[in-house]
Structures are given as C-alpha cells and as structure tokens.
Amino acid sequence: MRGLGLLRAAGRRGRGVVLQLPQARPDRFGGVSVDLAQLRGLERPRAALLRAWLQDSIKQWKREGKIAVWLHIPVLQSSFIATAALQGFTFHHAEGDSSTLTLWLGDGNSRLPGYATHQLGVAGAVLDNSTGKVLVVQDKNKTKNAWKFPGGLSDPGEDIGDTAVREVFEETGIKSEFKSILSIRQQHRHPGAFGKSDMYIICRLEPSSFNISFCQQECLRCEWMDLDELAKTKDATPITSSIAKLLLYGYREGFDKIDITMKEFSAVYTGLVYKLYHRELPESYKDMGGL
Amino acid sequence: MRGLGLLRAAGRRGRGVVLQLPQARPDRFGGVSVDLAQLRGLERPRAALLRAWLQDSIKQWKREGKIAVWLHIPVLQSSFIATAALQGFTFHHAEGDSSTLTLWLGDGNSRLPGYATHQLGVAGAVLDNSTGKVLVVQDKNKTKNAWKFPGGLSDPGEDIGDTAVREVFEETGIKSEFKSILSIRQQHRHPGAFGKSDMYIICRLEPSSFNISFCQQECLRCEWMDLDELAKTKDATPITSSIAKLLLYGYREGFDKIDITMKEFSAVYTGLVYKLYHRELPESYKDMGGL
C-alpha cells in the first residue's frame, strides 16, 4: 500500500486535486504490481501528478528493496506509457485493451519471466488404413506447389489434437479423430510469427468421412494420395517427406513404432487439466507404484 | 501510399503545420501497415492532426477494400494508442520499446493471425547409465517437497535441448548432453504464463560431470536417486512419476523404445535452421527417395 507516497506526490504539486492515486500490491517474488485501471481518465493535470507519483514511488520501492515493478495500463490510459518509459519501464506484453510494462530494480540483468515465446501450428496426417491413402493439400499462396498435410495455427487455449482435427476439417472438409503425435519441429525468429519461435506439431489422425470438399481460399489442390507415393515424391516439403516415410513405417510395421500417445491429468491444486504425450508405457511399468 | 489523405487532413486543421504524416504500406494479405516511428515527437497539435488523419485514412482504406490495419507505435509515442483505441484498434502485441495495434476492416470476425500463445519450459532427466541413478531436485519455494527433474523456461530463440542442458547446469552444477525428447505436456490458462498456454518438454540427457553443486536460491535438495526408487515414490509430481517409469523402461529394454530423436534441417528459402523431432526411422525408410 502506497498511502504516504500518494499524499506526498499530491501535496508537492500544490493543486489541491482530489485524486485517488494508484495503490501498489507487493507480490511474492519481491516486486510490486500497480494497476492503472484503478484510475478513471487521465486528464492532463492528473498526468503531471502521476508522473511525480511514479518518480517518488520508484525511489521508495528501491529503498524498500523491491526488485521489480509491474505496471498494468488500460488502453485508454496509454498516455501514461511514455511517462513510464521515460522512467525506464519497457513493454512486457500487451493484448486486447491493456498493456503491461515492467521496470527491473534488482541487481544485474532482469530476472523477470518473459512473455509467451512460441506460436503453435498443428497439422494432421489423416491416413485411411483401408486404402493406405493419406490426405494432402497444396497451398494456394505458395510459389512452389509442394504437397503437405493440412494444418494451421492453434487457437488460444486449444489442445494440440483439437487444432489438427479442426484445421483438417476447415481446409479439406474431412472429419477425423486424433490418434497420436508424430513429430515436433521448433524454428526460431520465424517471419510468420512476428519474429517469435514457431512450434509445429504433426498428428496422426484417422478419418471418419472421406469426401473431400476443400477450402478454395486456402488450397489449390487436395487429394487422397498413396502414402507410398507421398514418401517418394520430390514434390513435398522436407518435413512432409520425413513424416510420410515415418507414417509408412508405422502403417507397415505397426503404429506403436511411431506413435507418441496422450494421457490426460488433473492438476491437484489448480483444478486445471493437462495432457501429457510420450511413448506408450507397458502395463507392467504403469502398475509399479508412484502416482 | 497515402499522400492525398495526408494533405487533406493537414489542410482541414488549417494550422499550416508542416508535418510528414505517416505512410501506409500495403501487405500481401490485403491489409495496410503504418509505422509511427516515421514521426518524431507527437506534440499536442500534431496529435490532433494525427487523429484526423487516422479517421480519414480508415474511411479511405475501407473504400479501397483493405481488410486490416497494422499500427506500429514506438513507446515514446504511446499517447497515440488511446486515439487509435477510440477508432477501434486493439493491442496485437507489445515488447520492449514498441507496441502493435490492429484494426480489422474485413467481413465477419477478425482473421488476423494472433501473437505467440505458448511459453516453453524444458526439464532434463539426466540418467547416469553406469549406476542407474537419475538427477532430481526439490524446489525451494513449493509447499509440498516433491522430487522433480531440474528445468526452467526457455530463453527466446533457444533450442529445446539447449534449454534442458543450461537449466540442469544452473540448478545442479551437472554438465550433460542432449539425447532425446521423452515427453511433452500442454496446459492452458497457466497462472505462471500470464494466462497463456504452457508447453513443458522433458528431455533425456546424459551426464558428463557428476559432482552436484546445486543452486541454493532455487533448490531445497538435489541428489542422484535410484531410477527405480523415483519410479515408485509417492514424493514426486505425477509427470515426474510417469517419466521416471518411462525412463526405467528405456534403461532396461533400450532407449530406442522411448526416444523421440532429433534431426536438423535447413529451410531452403529463408536460410533458417530448424530441428525436427520424431521416432527414429529405419535406414531402409530413410533411403527410399523423396527429400
């Protein structure tokens, strides 16, 4: 609570402005957090008051040994961002109608956790086990018409398998079911990810419908292709080619050779559910105790 | 290029201010992009001019059939953010010293790509093959002292295996080498990820040093524990317990049963390098053609 600091800042301006200045909440990592949503409308005299308050507050937080300040700013109060930046704050992240800035007050380089670093793309390799054919598309907007598996970016909060099933349906009209993860690719400084990293996961799906009705906006072509042919063609991206071979290996010798399977857990304390993917464990190991 | 719009906006204010208004660059997705870094200092009369310019420009972009506007704003010009928000813009992302806002002008819901949705944590299961012991830690800041594998958040641009090796060294003083990925966990609305999703990957590592010197700030305990014991204990997180059993399975019956191995690729067009992880492919399949 910054009651004293507030009065001092207000008093020094000598304007008699009645203004509820923001309160700082300490966090359990030795920092403080201030939410400007506590304020209504930052008119100009108030902006000056806030500037003085921030300068005074930073001094006091340093004296108190705080190691960091988190500043949450509603978009309509963004005029305060430049003020904060002049005191050394930088953007931590922003989304929708608010931004968060941070100032490191501790020793050495900032040890504050960063924001999300990866976007997640998911593709589905839909294999019709009865025919050995796999569903492939060619992108409309690419110069080289290489065959690939349908897929796209995951929506916020969407599970990996759900993204694969949704994207396959949106692009091709084929309904399918998630079976396993087949591969993961990580790529940094991705142009399509605003310079962030890109994680790309290919899933094995089983089709429950077979009539293609592909999205004309996204796809140039879409067809059921012999898996064997896809594994051998030069007209495929390197990842598609690798995964086609892997899928062929599984199709011929058992999917247990290639599958990374999923198990769902409940997080005890938070009530959150999560999914864990790894190689299937023999029953004798599952039953050996532990959790 | 918005030359005409600029003149009209400037003329309407009738102040004779000589100001280079920002230029909009069209993108290949039918949108336009404006970078306010073109401007120097947004004084008050200029802010009014910019407001008028933005209002006029939005009307014109709509007439031209543009579907979206991207607005890049240096932190010191953030006073313009609220102006843009009043015209319907929202934050797309912000980092360091600039923010990006977007306005969807197309039909229906926005189809603009989102920003990074996942943070990535990586842990290392370091197994000493000569003794069957695995390196485990107990966190200092948790109430329940459950054994787990050392690990932490990946730095921007850092490869999965590098994060595992770095975090293991920082927490325990043990040097190690990346061998494979063992598991992936996805959890959404993660409290430690500012509400974003958390991807957590456990790698199999082989130690090249054995004397523990653990970080007193992060760890309460650190030891080499019999893998068998870790697989059976109740004092482990559910994920640690699952992966200990998996690792024991691999240790006894061959790591090829559990490993998700890595291959490095070069992206032809961008020159970027990426790493692809999947189950090891028999040589006969690797050589079958394709790419």
Image (cartoon, coloured by chain):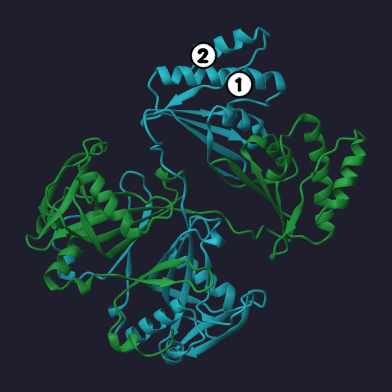
Chain colours: A cyan, B green
- Above or below, comparing residue A63 to residue B148 in the picture: above
Type of residue at label 1?
Answer: Arg
Residue A221 at x, y percent in the picture: 61, 84
Q: Are marks 2 and 1 on the same chain?
A: yes
- Can you tell which mark lies on residue A51? 1
Q: Residue at x 45, y 78 (%)?
A: A238
- Above or below, comparing residue A32 to residue A219 in the picture: above
Q: Nearer the viewer, mark 2 or mark 1?
A: 1
| Chain ID, mark 1 | A
- Can you tell which mark lies on residue A81? none
Q: Of A171 and A201, which appears nearest the observer?
A: A201
Q: Which residue, given by chain and number where applicable, does mark 2 sit on?
A: A5
Residues packed near mark 1 inside 10 Å, few (<14), some (14 to 19) or many (20 plus)? some
| Chain ID, mark 2 | A
Q: Real-space Cα distance between discs 2 and 1?
A: 12 Å
Residues packed near mark 2 inside 10 Å, few (<14), some (14 to 19) or many (20 plus)? some
Type of residue at label 2?
Answer: Gly
Q: Residue at x 37, y 59 (%)?
A: B159
Indicate the quadrant where residue A11 lies. Answer: top right
Q: Of B62 and B235, which appears nearest the observer?
A: B62
Q: As drawn, is A66 to the left or to the right of A155?
A: left
